[in-house]
Image: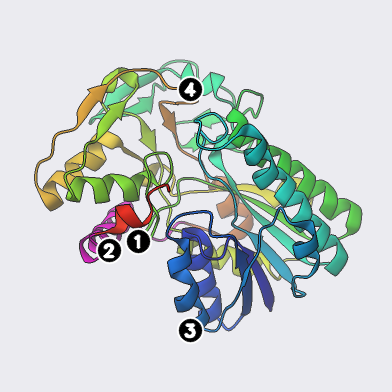
């Protein structure tokens, strides 16, 4: 099958490209290399047989000249929840990249009747009920207090797809939620398949770690180099929790979606994450790093930041029911993979640092 991957030289895009090439697919992709370090993935992917095009999905004329594909996997986005408000990118740039860019790709899909798979995010879910979530600290990690009333769509297994997406969800989350809605509408209106895969935190070796993006890779690389680290917010204890998923675990899912029969729109949106078995706090990640690399001091900073939430873990029960999908790579294996890569690439933080 002919597959076009947006953001093909990013961590997620390049990981999926390598796996899809190994399965015998014809893989083409484009990237604008806005993410520092992404250019290093171009030659290795080309050596494996991928066709790489330098292009920006905001460029309508360039999108119209892309080669024909049977399916598009959209892995291009500014993935930071702070994007548009952190002074590094403007709100206009964020919307142009994450939403207008999606529209341009959907127009491509309309023209070529190509299927569309959007890699979305857990940050489409409402912030207010998450920040007010009743939690308890267990083993240096926050967890929902099941003895109290929890918001609809949330259990100790995580958030399911019925959890609120009411604003505020951050500008970043809003661009992704709007992209989801438009993708489903385009697919229904113009008759091409669309799938919305809401992913938890994606992590693995080769991720371009930064404090606001790729936290697992950033924390491990920074710990190894004895860089300054802080527990931000929530009392400065590092108890906030996220789940963790390796992008290669999406490959069995994508293979099924590429050949799936027509489905109801409601079944085209699902959570994909490591779930509660993968959930880890920053404090627990620090404990793992200390065992692997030795001690390092982390400074507490309880200052509240915009869009911070104490606990977010996705429940992938719907994905398991519809797609017979389960995460395959344990969190400890993901951390070990990142650590091995960090030890083999001593300048990785400099390579992926903002310029």
| Residue drawn at point x = 68 percent, y = 39 percent | 95
Q: Is residue 304 above or below residue 49?
A: above
| For residue 87, side relative to residue 173 (left or right) | left
Q: How is the image coloured?
A: rainbow
Question: Of discs 1 and 4, which sits in the foreground?
Answer: 4
Q: Is residue 16 above or below residue 195?
A: below
Asked if the residue under mark 4 is in contact with the one under mark 1, i.e. CB atoms within 8 Å, the reply is no
> In the figure, residue 238 lies in which quadrant?
top left
Front residue of 286 and 224: 224
Provide the residue designation for mark 4.
306
Provide the residue designation for mark 2.
341
Which image quarter holds the N terminus? Answer: bottom right
Distance CA(mark 1)–CA(mark 2):
6 Å
Image disc number at residue 205: 1
Which of the marked residues, 2 or 4, is nearer the chain's N terminus? 4
User: How many neighbours does mark 1 have within 10 angstroms: few (below 14), some (14-19), or many (20 or more)?
Assistant: many
Provide the residue designation for mark 3.
47
Q: Which residues are magenta?
A: 327-346
Front residue of 218 and 315: 218
| Residue drawn at point x = 62 percent, y = 39 percent | 94
Estimate the x, y position of residue 195 in percent, counting from the top left. Answer: 70, 55
Asked if the residue under mark 2 is in contact with the one under mark 1, i.e. CB atoms within 8 Å, the reply is yes
Q: Is residue 17 above or below residue 340?
A: below
Which of the marked residues, 1 or 4, is nearer the chain's N terminus? 1
Element type where label 2 sits in the image: helix
């Amino acid at each position: 099958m002919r597959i076009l991957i947006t953001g093909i030289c990013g961590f997620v895009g390049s990981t999926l490209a390598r796996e899809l090439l190994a399965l015998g697919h014809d893989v083409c992709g484009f990237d604008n290399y806005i993410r520092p370090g992404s250019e290093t993935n171009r030659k290795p992917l080309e050596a494996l047989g991928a066709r790489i095009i330098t292009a920006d999905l905001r460029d309508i004329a360039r999108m119209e000249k892309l080669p024909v594909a049977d399916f598009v996997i959209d892995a291009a986005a500014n993935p930071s929840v702070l994007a548009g408000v952190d002074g590094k990118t403007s709100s206009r740039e964020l919307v142009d990249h994450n939403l207008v860019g999606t529209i341009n790709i959907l127009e491509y899909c309309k023209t070529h009747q190509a299927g569309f798979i959007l890699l979305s995010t857990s940050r489409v879910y409402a912030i207010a009920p998450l920040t007010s979530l009743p939690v308890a600290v267990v083993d240096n990690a926050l967890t929902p207090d099941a003895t109290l009333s929890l918001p609809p769509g949330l259990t100790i297994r995580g958030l399911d797809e019925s959890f609120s997406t009411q604003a505020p969800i951050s500008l970043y989350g809003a661009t992704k939620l709007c992209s989801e809605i438009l993708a489903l509408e385009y697919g229904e209106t113009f008759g091409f398949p669309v799938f919305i895969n809401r992913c938890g935190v994606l992590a693995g070796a080769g991720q371009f770690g930064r404090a606001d993006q790729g936290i697992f890779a950033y924390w491990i690389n920074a710990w190894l180099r004895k860089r300054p680290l802080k527990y931000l917010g929530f009392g400065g204890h590092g108890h906030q929790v996220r789940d963790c998923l390796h992008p290669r675990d999406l490959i069995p899912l994508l293979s099924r979606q590429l050949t799936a029969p027509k489905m109801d729109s409601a079944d085209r949106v699902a959570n994909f994450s490591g779930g509660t078995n993968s959930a880890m706090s920053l404090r627990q990640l620090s404990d793992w790093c200390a065992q692997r690399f030795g001690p390092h001091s982390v400074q507490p900073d309880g200052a509240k930041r915009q869009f911070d939430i104490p606990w977010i873990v996705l429940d992938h029960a719907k994905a398991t029911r519809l797609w017979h999908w389960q995460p395959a790579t344990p969190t400890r294996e993901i951390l070990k993979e990142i650590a091995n890569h960090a030890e083999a690439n001593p300048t990785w933080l400099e390579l992926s640092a903002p310029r």
